[in-house]
Amino acid sequence: MAHLGYLLAGRSGYLQQRNWVQICLIGQLQNNLLEMLRKLGQQIRDLRGVGA
């Protein structure tokens, strides 16, 4: 994820066992936040080779 420009911290065993990602939003939210998260989800699926 780092090479895509996202920093993931706290790589807990709990999240890894469930193949989950936790997102923390800090600061002023942008209007396009949901679109950004949708694109991030697609990038993750692409990396894992999962269908659209």
Image: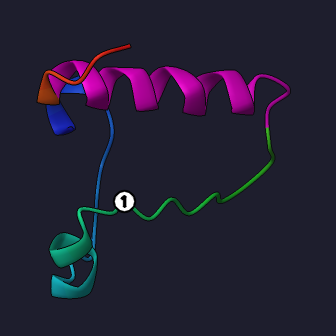
Q: Residue at x 65, y 60 (%)?
A: 26
* Image coordinates for residue 15, horizontal then vertical, percent: 28, 75
Q: Residue at x 79, y 32 (%)?
A: 30
> Looking at this view, is 23 or 49 the one in front?
49
Secondary structure mostly seen in magenta is: helix
Relative horizontal placement of residue 18, taking residue 23 as reference (left or right):
left
Q: Is residue 13 magenta?
A: no
Q: Is residue 32 magenta?
A: yes
Q: Quadrant of residue 10?
A: bottom left
Mark 1: few, some, or many residues within 10 Å (few <14, many ≥20)? few
Q: Quadrant of residue 2?
A: top left
Q: Residue at x 72, y 31 (%)?
A: 34
* Image coordinates for residue 49, horizontal then vertical, percent: 14, 21
* Image coordinates for residue 28, horizontal then vertical, percent: 80, 48
Q: Residue at x 77, y 22 (%)?
A: 32
> Looking at this view, is 35 or 48 the one in front?
48
Amino acid found under the numbered disc labelled 1? Val
Disc 1: which residue: 21
Asked which secondary structure carries label 1, the reply is loop
Q: Looking at the image, which residue sits at the far right? A: 31
Relative horizontal placement of residue 17, taking residue 9 as reference (left or right):
left
State whether residue 11 appears in this view: no
Vertical arrangement, residue 4 with respect to residue 11, above or below: above
Q: Report the span colored magenta.
A: 30-47
Q: Quadrant of the C terminus?
A: top left
* Image coordinates for residue 33, horizontal then vertical, percent: 72, 32
